[in-house]
Image (spheres, rainbow, N blue to C red):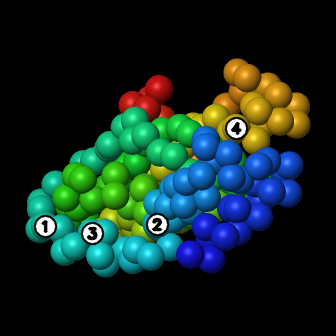
Amino acid sequence: MALEQHYTAILEQLGEDVTREGLLDTPKRAAKAMQYLCKGYSQTLDEVTNGALFSSDNSEMVLVRNIELYSLCEHHMLPFIGKAHVAYLPNGKVLGLSKIARIVDMYARRLQIQENLTREIAEAIQQVTEAAGVAVVIEAQHMCMMMRGVEKQNSSMVTSVMLGQFRDNPSTRSEFLTLVR
């Protein structure tokens, strides 16, 4: 209820008539939308992975490409939208496929900067799988740069985090980067 009241106040401060037909339910809908967009705060890594870790002899790269993500920039609370590529080198355990996407979503559904989001995903995959290496690349477009400020419509930001063998072994890193291109 408090969040809804804050949206009412924001609309009033913008000079809107909050009693007009089109805005009658806007504070309620905006509050509900913001709670959904930030639901990652109420999730934990254990809940999201839900024990979906399985024994495996595979030690070759596991890669999930093009995981769409939607987040809010912590500076302007405007969306950034993109995709994540996540890989790991199993060390006796593999993670259920959907859990990788769920980890991406959990961290993306928090106020973020892309640099931190990339690291949080990589560290979470490492923590859960105890992999020999983890690599994450995110490419996203930021509405705070497209809709305001410099208004650059075709710009995108790419961030990467390499852990373990992806950091230490140039050929492993190169294989990953080739596969995500």
Q: Amino acid at mark 1?
A: Phe
Q: Amino acid at mark 4?
A: Met
Sequence order check: which comes first, mark 3 or mark 1?
Answer: 3
Sequence order check: which comes first, mark 4 or mark 3?
Answer: 3
Tell me the residue that label 4 is attached to.
143
Tell which of 20 and 110 is nearer to you. 20
| Nearer the camera: disc 4 or disc 1 | 4
Q: Secondary structure at mark 4?
A: helix
| Nearer the camera: disc 3 or disc 1 | 3
Image location of residue 121, percent across then percent down: 47, 60
Tell me the residue that label 3 is attached to.
49
Q: Amino acid at mark 3?
A: Thr
Residue 145 shows up from this direction: yes
Tell me the residue that label 1 is attached to.
54
Tell which of 84 and 33 is nearer to you. 33
Q: CA distance from mark 4 to mark 1?
A: 39 Å
Q: Secondary structure at mark 1?
A: strand
Indicate whether 133 appears above or below 17.
Answer: below
Q: Secondary structure at mark 2?
A: helix
10 Å neighbourhood of mark 2: few (<14), some, or many (≥20)? some
